Amino acid sequence: MKNTKHKIGFIGFGNMAQAITNGLLRSKLLSPKNIFFVCKTEENKKAVQKKWKIQAASSLKELAEASDILILATKPQQATEYLEELSQHVKHHLLISVMAGVTTETLQNKLNWKGSIVRAMPNTPGLIGQGATGIFFNKACQKSEKDHVRLLFSELGLVGEIKTEELMDVITALSGSGPAFVYEFARTLMQTAEELGLDAKLAKDFTLQTLHGATEMLKHSEHSPEELRDQVTSKGGTTEAGLNLLHKKQFAETLSACIKAAAERAQELRN
């Protein structure tokens, strides 16, 4: 199955909606005429239409009438203002939410809806087909709906089904927020290399290849991260000197706390 007759409507069109749309269009699962959206400002609407050539709806009512799948892609803090109005127009739809922290129970209550709801947490590397998406299905979802959702998000990269909804907070912190933590790590490597004398291009090229190569080693090697680390580390050598400082500065504890803080914030958004 490499095409679909479904029509998808996006409520909000930020990074996650763009990643999904890019996957749909790149794979030809849908054509631009079958993808609809609403967003807040006329300026944003024109920018989206110009870049993606998809269809702008003038209201939530028009969006719901044009679509059979609705993707809730606003910021969690903006959800309430949309859900009250949307509750008047949800009828036969499959609902997919990519809003961090907003539970299926909250959506059911706000929308007065007992039908199919999917929570999905993609990430921005999905824009280039290298993403990771965690998905959770409520009990109303049928097998055909689950299959279609898996197909839709597979165009963004890895898809994993989460059996317990509370664990979506962990997915949000790990793969949803995780790219930002990696980018900050990469930025620091590049900046430090420049401070030590490398030109900007060489610092960037070697940083990116180092990250890529290390990731590929993790992916294809039978060794654990600890074993791969130890293979690079010679007693009394340069790597050991750097690792000793990381341990002294509690790098592992800080990174762990970083992921936990993101997960806790996701929990706060659903409370």
Image (cartoon, grey):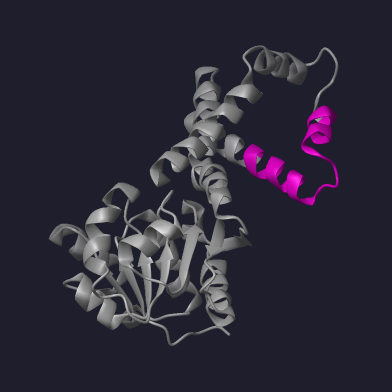
Determine which quarter of the picture holds residue 137: bottom right
Residue at the spot 26% in from the left edge and 82% down from the top edge: 65
Residue at the spot 37% in from the left edge and 70% down from the top edge: 113
Q: Is residue 183 visible?
A: no
Q: Nearer the viewer, residue 225 or 171?
A: 171
Which percent across, then down, holds residue 159? Answer: 60, 62
Q: Is residue 101 above or below residue 187?
A: below
Q: Using residue 255 as the reference point, say whether residue 61 is left or right of it.
A: left
Membership of 255 in magenta stretch: no
Determine which quarter of the picture holds residue 34: bottom left
Q: Using residue 233 as the reference point, say whether residue 194 is left or right of it.
A: left
Which percent across, then down, holds residue 150? Answer: 57, 71
Quadrant of the rendering where the C terminus is positioned:
top left
* Magenta span: 210-231
Quadrant of the rendering where the N terminus is positioned:
bottom right
Q: Is residue 141 visible?
A: yes
Q: Is residue 82 above or below residue 172?
A: below
- Identify the residue at the far left of this view: 42
Residue at the spot 49% in from the left edge and 53% down from the top edge: 123
Which percent across, then down, holds residue 94? Answer: 42, 75
Residue at the spot 55% in from the left edge and 35% down from the top edge: 259
Q: Main secondary structure of the magenta part?
A: helix
- Identify the residue at the far bottom of this view: 5
Membership of 213 in magenta stretch: yes
Q: Using residue 236 as the reference point, say whether residue 261 is left or right of it.
A: left
Q: Is residue 106 above or below residue 266?
A: below
Q: Nearer the viewer, residue 102 or 157?
A: 102
